[in-house]
Image (cartoon, rainbow, N blue to C red):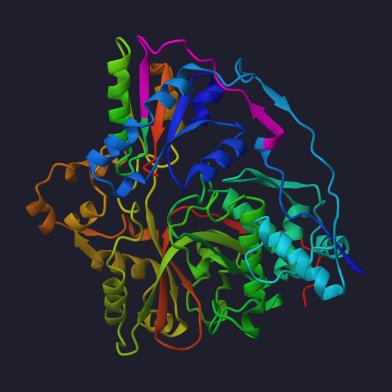
Amino acid sequence: MVFMEKAGKPAVAIVSAGFEEDAAITGRVLGMPGLRFLTVPHVLTGLPDEQIEHEIEGTLSSAIEFLTQAVAGTSGGGHSVQAVGQQVAESFRGGDEPDAWRRMTAAFLERGWSDGFPIIPPTPERVTTMLGGTSLAPDYVVGILPPGNGIATVEKIAINCVMAGCRPAHLPVMIAGVESILAHAGPGYDMSTTCAAPLMLVNGPIVRELGINSGRCALGPGAQSATNIALGRALRLIKMNIGFNRPGLMDMDTIGSPTKFSLCLGENEAASPWEPFHAEMGFDPRHSTVTVFDIVNQKELADMYNTTPEGILDTFAFLTSVSPMHYGYYGSNEGGGSGYLILVSPEHASILARHGWSKDSTKKYVWQRARIPASRHSNQNQLRHAGVIANHWKKFLKQPSAVLDKTLLPVVETPDLYNLVVVGGQAGKSLAFSSSNKFAVIEIKNRTGLGAT
Amino acid sequence: MVEIKVLRPEAVSQGDLKTFSQAPRPTTLDGKRIGLLWNDKRGGDVALRRLGQLLQQRYRDVQLVPYQGPRGYPKALLEKAFRECDVFMGATGD
């Protein structure tokens, strides 16, 4: 709607109750504060058609008003530029230091600046120290982070890193993490009602240098994962405070997920029989990289009994024989689709490699074996709509259900939509996440070496 | 009394720096082509179609032109719709 208004034609959106603030802030961050929209009492997705028709009838007079009457003083096109204030420190006072810190924590939480856990105060001194971790200037703009289109300066990233408990050496990792998101995130990024979360994968020598856990319980709590936790948490705070991706505003996640608090790990390259992920993607394995995957769901791929690749991978295929995302399978004319990120345990990887299986042959086998009836895809709203489905799947749109029941299709479009990363301690327990097919591997640069330990 | 000084973690949004004005409004919807933008979520099409019908009953010679696209409408789709219609209504189902 904003696109149309900016281009010069009236537009109005229908918004469900509970999504008004989300719609309002969306207008604001796209440069159209005060954008008007039609509000219906309920989310439409679960309503019968008759009720939808009844509820929309109540918006008719507003629709006419919004399409034919200008808001006073806003018609005529063009734009204005406002000044931006300088970065000014804010003071919090208390009877003692814990009291002042408590007041600051409460204020940050109230403003939507915190994930709910205690935060390290981003004092000017701590932020200056953090900025020493990169050779980039504090005012260097890494990019404009959707969905809120926040201007991601190095300083803003550093402030959020301080709050999360990062060290200066973590700052270049986080800058690369932001760049990884920017490389694939479009307008409306991660505003969905889905419980999506960013998973940050780190590859290369920096994993060992910074003590990023790539072994046992790499995604868990505790001292061995302290760096992982701080890095993942910083990315969440950056999404909230720079991307304005806040629950109930520009993060309309229906239920949420603990994965949204912190999700960062390294690849266990020392225990992997294969080339590391970043080398597979064309990077020099001696360099260090960050890759941010957008993930939902989590399924343990437990198999401690089979000792052959086929046996283990049949388990993988069985346990991932579901469409990875509700809109993931059919792709789109824009090249959509989604896949799986499989964290392969060193034990599983070693059995596969010992029998001569590469990453490619592993992916192809799982892709071939993880198949479900086309009718199940269709039931989940896939293979249904001509306007969003990729051309090569349109032949399924008019098939009778009996044919769809008997037609087995892979759960992802192509084998390369499985991504394999070796992670974890020794046990026959791998882990699968559903993931977006869009991700970018970014080399970590501009390190100063400060604060590595 | 102890004081903690902290820096603001929230970024400036680009949208706050550069604001756009609302498009000029027609005085009537008579004879207008109304683009109905639906992102494929269940129910949005039903709401748009019904609202369009109500506008057709209220105004003369209103044409409804439906557009369906994946989330985050492709720019080419938006540009096509912009060329073909006079005003727009959109729905996402939520």
Q: Toward the viewer: A10 or A56?
A: A56
Residue B82 placement, left or right of A34: left
**Quadrant of the rendered structure where residue B31 is?**
top left
| Residue placed furthest toward the left | A402
Residue A205 placement, left or right of A162: left
Q: Toward the viewer: A394 or B22?
A: B22
Reply above or below: B30 against A197. Answer: above
Measuring from the top left, give residue A140's x and y in whole percent.
77, 47
Reply above or below: A50 against A46. Answer: above
Reply above or below: B36 against A147. Answer: above
The C terminus of chain B sits in image quarter = top left
Residue A351 placement, left or right of A126: left
Measuring from the top left, give residue A94's x and y in whole percent.
85, 69
**Quadrant of the rendered structure where residue A85 is?**
top right
The N terminus of chain B sits in image quarter = bottom right
Measuring from the top left, give residue B44's x and y in whole percent.
33, 38
**Residue at screen point 41% across, 83% down:** A429
Q: Is residue A287 visible?
A: no
Tally of numbered discs: 0
- Range of residues picked out in magenta: B16-36
Measuring from the top left, give residue A226's x and y in whole percent.
66, 78
**Quadrant of the rendered structure where residue A314 is?**
bottom left
Q: Is residue B33 magenta?
A: yes
Q: Toward the viewer: A287 or B10?
A: B10
| Residue placed furthest toward the right | B1
Q: Toward the viewer: A320 or A65?
A: A65
**Residue at screen point 57% across, 72% down:** A265
Q: Is residue A82 magenta?
A: no
**Residue at screen point 13% across, 53% down:** A404
Q: Is residue A218 visible?
A: yes
